[in-house]
Amino acid sequence: MANLIQQVRDAGVIGAGGAGFPTYKKIEARVDTVIANGAECEPLLFKDKMLMEHYAAEMIDGIQLVMHHTGASKGIVAIKHKNRKAIDAVKAHLPPSISLFEMEDVYPAGDEYEVVYHSTGRRIPSGGIPLHIGVVVQNVETLYHIHRASQGQPVTHSLMTVHGQVKNPLTAWFPVGMSYGEALQVAGGATIDDFVLLDGGPMMGKVVTELNTPVTRVSSGIIVLGRATHLAERKMQSELAFKRIGKSACDQCSLCTEMCPRYLLGYPIQPHLVMRSLLTTGPMSDTLTHWAQACCECNICSLWACPEELDPRNVCVVTKRDLKQQGKWLSAEQLQKLTKDVHPMKSYRGVPTARLMRRLGLHKFTAEAPLYTGKIAPNSVGISLKASVGVPPTPVVRVGDHVREGEMIATASESALSVPAHASIAGQVKSVGQSIVITKA
Ligand code: SF4
Ligand code: SF4
């Protein structure tokens, strides 16, 4: 079983539900509980739901492999209670050591801190990780990839939803390196001319305007929205603008803090104090900015809570950036001293998805995005070698080489946190740089 670590590393498995942390490192531990996170909460994303409906057996095998390797006696599948079809599919494969945990249809149910707290009653320490409380959390797609890795299959495709202003919303396995523009065509193309893409969903996703942006192993969904929609405009506001407006219009009502899911869990985050820091300088400002550090960037404060439509989330994001650059980042121990009990109103302040969709102006998109099983065969792919966490892999192919689908094209650094990359289509290598371009032979 020690072998699982090597298999998962060799297959290039990284967390499919977040920052792309190399999975082999995350499962190199002894824990008592493994949680499969299928509580997908970004509006209009269906990829985890589709994965559980169509690949439940493989996903459960992935949990069992991780449980066996980590010594965990308990497995939990966290899933929203509204996803009855996925629940039935998972139930059909559950062994006695793995249970289902049904979650409310609220945002952000899928946040790792929420999933761990609700399903185990334990809180991840502020500034810590689930391992610190004996838990490993893996997204359900990652567990599917762990199952495949154990069969010698590398990660070549990413399960991604294409939704919003497209002809046929769908979820499909897209080859890594395929452009978002081509992915849109698989969904019948955009139904409007002037649009942007919300990469990762409407709440936490970022605005992408370049259609040649490639699919990566962490791509979860792209939402097509009119460039002039209120949501797209709000998400495209510049730092200068959201700070200037925040400075002049924040009345310190503190609703952003009162609705903040991390604040409600007792963590040291208070966005209204971070907003106040915009008006201060020196030691006073330093004291206020530290209340940004535990922010998970969920966007509840900006897109749901603030009556003035200010942007405390992005003020927290840039404040965290500045704290790091200025060497003022608090240690985990310092943050833990500031942690309090769970707020007594916590269970009343989840944001229902349907109401959130209305607030975001997305309620007209009522269709699900079913799994598309047709062949997706792009003429070329540009596989990015950038690593959001760890060291990028080193190319092992040269221009002109012919590669097979699944062949390793860049090798992991042996001495650092690193995973290899694999060809997602068969073809000829056209260029090698920060990404490797392969065209169909
Ligand atoms: S909710 Fe808006 S106005 Fe109220 S404190 Fe927060 S940022 Fe300021
Ligand atoms: S984005 Fe806002 S609501 Fe979400 S954790 Fe950060 S401060 Fe709290």
Image: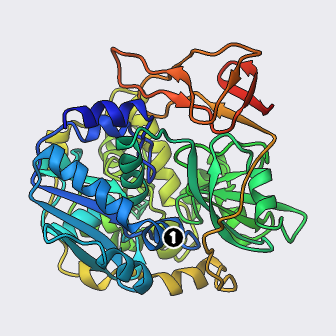
Q: How is the image coloured?
A: rainbow
For the residue carrying disc 1, how many other residues have a C-alpha within 10 Å: few (<14), some (14-19), or many (20+)? many
Q: Quadrant of residue 112?
A: bottom left
Q: Considering depth in this image, is 39 or 188 the residue closer to the camera?
A: 188
Q: Residue at x 22, y 67 (%)?
A: 76
Q: Please determine whether, in this image, residue 103 is positioned above or below residue 186.
A: below
**Which image quarter holds the N terminus?**
top left
Q: Could you tell me which secondary element the residue under label 1 belongs to?
A: helix
Q: Amino acid at mark 1?
A: Met
Residue 48 position within the rendered picture, expressed as x and y whole percent measured from the top left: 47, 66
Judged left or right of residue 163, residue 123 is left
Residue 125 position within the rendered picture, expressed as x and y whole percent measured from the top left: 17, 51
> Is residue 102 visible in the rendered structure shown here?
yes
Q: Residue most toward the right?
A: 193
Q: Residue at x 50, y 75 (%)?
A: 304
Judged left or right of residue 385, residue 340 is left
Ligand 2 closer than 8 Å to label 1 CB: no
Q: Please determine whether, in this image, residue 112 is positioned above or below residue 305.
A: above
Q: Quadrant of residue 397?
A: top right
Q: Residue at x 53, y 29 (%)?
A: 421
Residue 121 position within the rendered picture, expressed as x and y whole percent measured from the top left: 13, 69
Residue 219 position within the rendered picture, expressed as x and y whole percent measured from the top left: 57, 51
> Is residue 270 visible in the rendered structure shown here?
no
**Which image quarter holds the C terminus?**
top right
Q: How many marks?
A: 1
Residue that carries the numbered disc 1 in the rendered image: 50
Q: Please determine whether, in this image, residue 269 is positioned above or below residue 100.
A: above
